[in-house]
Amino acid sequence: MLKAPRYYHWLLIFALAIIWGFAFYLIAIALRSFPPLTLVTLRLIFGAITLVIVMRIKGLSLPRERVWWGYFSLLALMGNLLPFSLITWAETIIPSSQAGLIMALMPISTMVLAHYLVAHERLTPRRACGVLLGFLGVTVLMGGQVLKGIGGGSLWPQLACVLATVAYAVNSVYAKRLPEINGLVLGAGSLIAGSFLLAPLALVVEQPWTIEVSVTSWLAIIVLGAVATGLATWIYFFVINECGPNFLSIINYIVPAISFAAGVVLLSEPATLAQFFGLMLICIGIAVSQPRRRRQQRATEI
């Protein structure tokens, strides 16, 4: 039975949005020295090391059953390797803002998949309305210019971003359908599996031992791995297990909202009335999409 989101779940969602939002800056710094496959591999390795250390401190251990490593490998493929590769390739052709808008489709993909595959995550008119309002809010917040170029010659990279959103949605729904396991162990296992899957390809294709790496790039990749991958993966699986994939998917609306607010407050960037309207739509959409579980539980108790 899924839990109704509590205040600490919302704090974790906002923390995850900030961490993943800051990750784009760290990726840009790390790319000054590391090629893409090596970057992702090191990101997974440092993330795995971080979670294994925390796991050992808490007295937990990885499962020995072979079937679990199949689960971990599929989670790594759908949640890390496939979407990371698709988005990175797509952003070499289309603007990042357009990719960001397409990524906001993830709650829609998650909502449809969860309806059929996860108990207590049914697609209701209220939830569908909330998700669509959130997507409309992201579109307004980013501005109409981001819609230019949809289709046409950029169709394939746009479809790659759409496929990445489906991969993320499948990953979050699949994680909820696994046998019960500690979220920390699940995160560590998936990052270890991802490291072993990608490392051979990075070694063969990019030969990272020939690369000269700056201190700032090393610091960026360590923080990217430990925080934006390790800690973030732990939070990710914890929230999915507690509140389900639909609740987690709203992070794709929160990230652009936080980015907009930070730009206005911290960088004194100009803000139009339309952008404030888009932010309002995002907030309304998030509120509408959340089911009223507490009222349902009280009615059942009575």
Image (tube, rainbow, N blue to C red):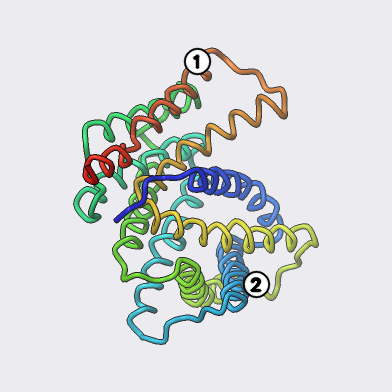
Counting residues from the N terminus, which is met first, the one under dot 1 or under dot 2? 2
Q: Nearer the viewer, residue 47 or 57?
A: 57
| Image location of residue 9, percent across then percent down | 48, 48
Q: Residue at x 78, y 57 (%)?
A: 216
* Residue wearing tag 1: 274
| Image location of residue 254, percent across then percent down | 50, 37
Quarter of the image where one finds residue 148: top left
Q: Is residue 14 above or below residue 170?
A: above
Amino acid tagged 2: Pro
For disc 2, the neighbor class at 10 Å (few under 14, some 14 to 19, many from 20) is: some
| Image location of residue 238, percent across then percent down | 46, 59
Task: Residue lying at the far top in this picture: please name it.
Answer: 273
**Labels 1 and 2 touching (C-beta < 8 A):** no
| 132 sits left or right of 236 in the view | left
Q: Is residue 294 above or below residue 50?
A: above
Query: Which quadrant holds the C terminus?
Result: top left
Query: For the residues carrying marks 1 and 2, which lies nearer the camera in this image?
Result: 1
Determine the CA span between mark 1 and mark 2: 46 Å
For disc 1, the neighbor class at 10 Å (few under 14, some 14 to 19, many from 20) is: some
Q: Residue at x 41, y 87 (%)?
A: 64
Q: Residue at x 53, y 34 (%)?
A: 256
Name the disc covering residue 235, or none: none
Amino acid tagged 1: Ala
Name the disc covering residue 208, or none: 2
Q: Is residue 199 above or below residue 18?
A: below
| 76 sits left or right of 97 in the view | left
Q: Residue at x 35, y 42 (%)?
A: 107
| 148 sits left or right of 95 in the view | left
Query: Which quadrant holds the N terminus?
Result: bottom left
| Image location of residue 146, percent across then percent down | 47, 28
